[in-house]
Image (cartoon, grey):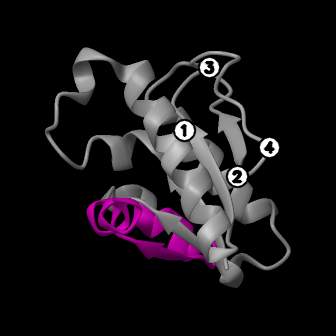
Amino acid sequence: MRWIVDAMNVVGSRPDGWWRDRHGAVRTLVDRLEHWARATESEVTVVLEQLMSPALQSGVIAVRHAPRAAANSADDEIVRLVQADGAPQDITVVTSDGALSARVRAAGATTFPAGRFRDLLD
């Protein structure tokens, strides 16, 4: 199965103080996604809101950065990835954003709630 993860939607699914260290929270998410992808043999792409740091790269999962630091740019990048794929029906987008969910479903992908996905990672 192939997954596209809305990073900040997953990070923000729990009020655990992530806002005090956004970079650390995203780094932790990437680490957990790497472990989960290996364990489940899943193909994972995580989309970040903006360029966080060159350190946020991975040899296990694909790390994509929204092309600009603007509202909804990560959502736009997720939709672009789904629309550009030859088999969008094989993609599950992890988000609890209603507008993004509607857009990716219209493009042929399915969705999975961010909070439930974070439970899988933990």
Using the image, determine if residue 10 lies above or below residue 19.
below
Q: Any magenta on residue 24? A: no
**Disc 3 residue crowd, few under 14, some 14–19, many 20+, Cα 10 Å:** some
Q: Earlier in the sequence, mark 3 or mark 4?
A: 3
Q: Earlier in the sequence, mark 2 or mark 3?
A: 3
Name the foreground residue: 72 vs 37. 37
Q: CA distance from mark 4 to mark 2?
A: 22 Å
Q: CA distance from mark 3 to mark 4?
A: 18 Å
Which residue position is annotated with label 4? 59
Q: Nearer the viewer, mark 2 or mark 3?
A: 3
Q: Report, in whole angstroms, how far the alpha carbon at label 2 lies from the one at label 1.
A: 10 Å
- Mainly helix, strand or loop, the magenta region? helix
Circle 1 Cα neighbour tier, 10 Å, few/some/many (<14 / 14–19 / ≥20): many
- Please, what secondary structure does the residue beneath circle 3 have? loop
Q: Which numbered disc flags the more N-terminal residue, 2 or 1?
A: 1
Q: Residue furthest left?
A: 15
In the displayed orientation, state which residue is furthest to the bottom.
Answer: 89
Which amino acid type is marked by label 3? Answer: Leu
Query: Residue 23 location in percent, x, y?
Result: 44, 20
Q: Secondary structure at mark 2?
A: helix
**Mark in front: 4 vs 2:** 4
Label 1 vs 3, first from the N-terminus: 3
The kind of secondary structure element at disc 1 is helix
> In the image, which disc is placed on residue 80?
2
* Marks 1 and 4 close (CB-CB < 8 Å): no
- Which image quadrant is residue 12 in? top left
Residue that numbered label 3 is attached to: 51
Using the numbered discs, state the Cα–Cα distance from disc 1 to disc 4 in whole angstroms.
Answer: 21 Å
As shown in the figure, which amino acid type bears the numbered disc 4? Gly
Q: Are marks 3 and 4 in contact (CB under 8 Å)?
A: no
